[in-house]
Amino acid sequence: MRISNFAMIAALAAPAPLLAQDQSRPADTSFSVGDIIVTARGMAGNTGNVLTSVDRMGGDVAQAADVDNVYELIGQMPGVQVTDFNQGTTSGKFSLRGFNGEGNINAVKLLIDGVPSNSNDGNMPYIDMVFPLNIKTIEVVRGTSDPRFGLHAIAGSANIITRSGGNYIEARGSAGSYSTFEGQAVAGFDSGSLSQNYQVAYRDSRGYRDHGASQRLSLSGRWGLSVGDDVALGAIARYYEADAEEPGYLTFAASRADPQQTNAYNASDGDERDIQQYALTADVAFSDSLDWTSRAYFNRFDDDRFVKFSAGASQQRRLTREDHYGVMSALHWHGELGAMPLMLEAGGDVQRQDNQSLRWLAVERVPTSQTRDQQFDLSVSGAYVQAVLEPADWLRITPAWRIDWVGGNFTNRLNSTTAPINDYGSIDQPKLSVAVLPAAGWTLYGNWGRTFQIGLGSGAYLIAPRVVDLAPSINEGWELGARYEVAGLFQARVAYWEQSASGEIARKLNDPLGDFENVGSTNRRGIDVQASVTPAQGLTLWGAFSWQEAIIAVPDPATPQLAGNAINHTPEALWSGGIDWTPGDVLTLSLTTRGQSSYHLTTANTQGKWGALAVFDASASWQVSETVELGLAVKNITDDYYEYVWWDGAQSLHSPANPRNVTASARLRF
């Protein structure tokens, strides 16, 4: 992994009106992993208008990565927790700010090229559509002060930006442990007014665990049309399919006796998944000070899974079909109010879902009885206004306000009953950010804001016997941070944050109705520290450490004994770091590490602590010629045993992770 910094990073993190004024110093709250290159002023809806902790990964790091899934890439970024189920297409996800990746509360808004990419329950299956060679940048925005997004943006957002424009043809092939083969090809053709970008990727792996084979195919295209100098139109199309076996979860004794094994009762478990995503975009610069951006999208998610969690449980067939579509738009103006630089932005979105969730009990993929047949639609509409004021050269003030409204209906087709959406009312979310620039290279910043959580699946509706509408859970958070940079040599950032929820709810993961349970009022807090230094030409050292705490402050009245307990699957410490050395023009060597402390399996905090890990990876790349680059990666070089663990109500169940493994690769540039 190469970590370098450019002065232009500051331009990406600065409010847009500041970019137009050479005399202004940019307020930069970002931390970068890899090369971030900015070629133009950000338009409406840009991350640069947000003064909170922002992390970015450059395409140079992403495109060279050897990972099973892209969420592992995001897990290399500071303070991000990765939950690796390692169960076929249900492989895992990332989370941040004291929220876990279990699936009962999903607190990160995922976007791909700005297109919403969460499933109804907030999970992130769409992330598998993107392969590393096609990534330009990954942006992670933390906290509660960003007004651009509503649904799922409880603790922040992540946007995976793919390659666009340019003229290139590249291919990358790799082969490695567990009979793993992967091929990626990308191409870009840019004639000035018309740009075309394409990706074809395929991955086939037997998997470390027995009965863990998978095949994945991804196709995508991105087209851009410039109409004069001021209008840019675009279209995006993606298709993905996967077919995977599931090795299942092992008991503690079985995981220690033979972590590679599968259970006999998991022999017919597996999943077939098809995903599609389409979008149309428009960006218009009406003048040097006024621009507009808009996008319309359609997502389709089709998943057919057979799974048996333990010997005493029945196999289930879980069939999910979701169609999501919507429109997002923002208008952006920057100029001056008297002598004070000023930016104003107004935007909003309408997101609609048509969902089906069906389940059966089954024996060896033969259904025996149906336990769920639900159809439900959900619409979430939001609007926001935001300003960036610069009353002095050393001060930036960013007030914002967002409001969301929720609608929808639910039908239980097993008993022919219906239910309306909970009357959530208008969900108000005020926000405020301030940045102070006391000296060259320094940015001191603070922010405060509110986000919201609503029920997911059937939990969003007023289903009998409930007769009282569930109110939204309001998350209120604040952050204080400081960032310092000496361009090209050193960058560091430290931030303290807190976030509390008024009435957190958690989806019951194995409930036939798909209902929720009341967690209660919760408090989260933490400290994030990141730094990178380049002491000599070609040598970079970097590291990140996060301490976090997530506790139940006021529990559900039915479980008063949980007061003060830690929320399950939330480690208190997360860390990552590395050394990157380029001794010459053709060779690059990297050593990286990531890790976390242990976590409780349930909020009862009575089943011990599990899940600690400390993993080291090494890689080398050799630029044979201008067109050929060879690579070798060794992951988990110390061959440590680590795992994902959960509690099924009677026992701990374990999913061992990959031991030491090797991947060789070749990248061709034509």
Image (cartoon, rainbow, N blue to C red):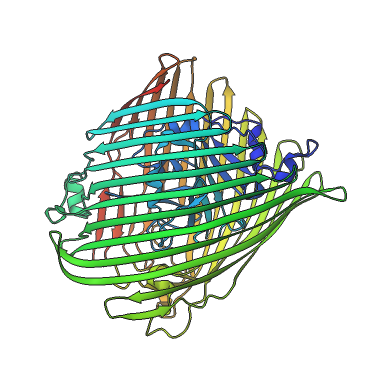
Q: Residue at x 57, y 43 (%)?
A: 233
Residue 577: image x %, image y %? 48, 36
Question: What is the total number of numbered labels drawn onto the structure image?
Answer: 0
Residue 620: image x %, image y %? 39, 23
**Is residue 218 visible from the viewing direction of this image?**
yes
Q: Residue furthest right?
A: 338
Residue 89: image x %, image y %? 29, 49
Q: Residue at x 53, y 43 (%)?
A: 234
Residue 661 placement: quadrant: top left
Locate residue 211 relative to residue 99 in the image: left or right: left
Locate residue 235 relative to residue 368 in the image: left or right: right
Locate residue 397 relative to residue 612 in the image: left or right: right
In this view, 334 is above or below 384 = above
In this view, 532 is above or below 362 = above
Q: Residue at x 45, y 21 (%)?
A: 588
**Is residue 51 visible from the viewing direction of this image?**
no
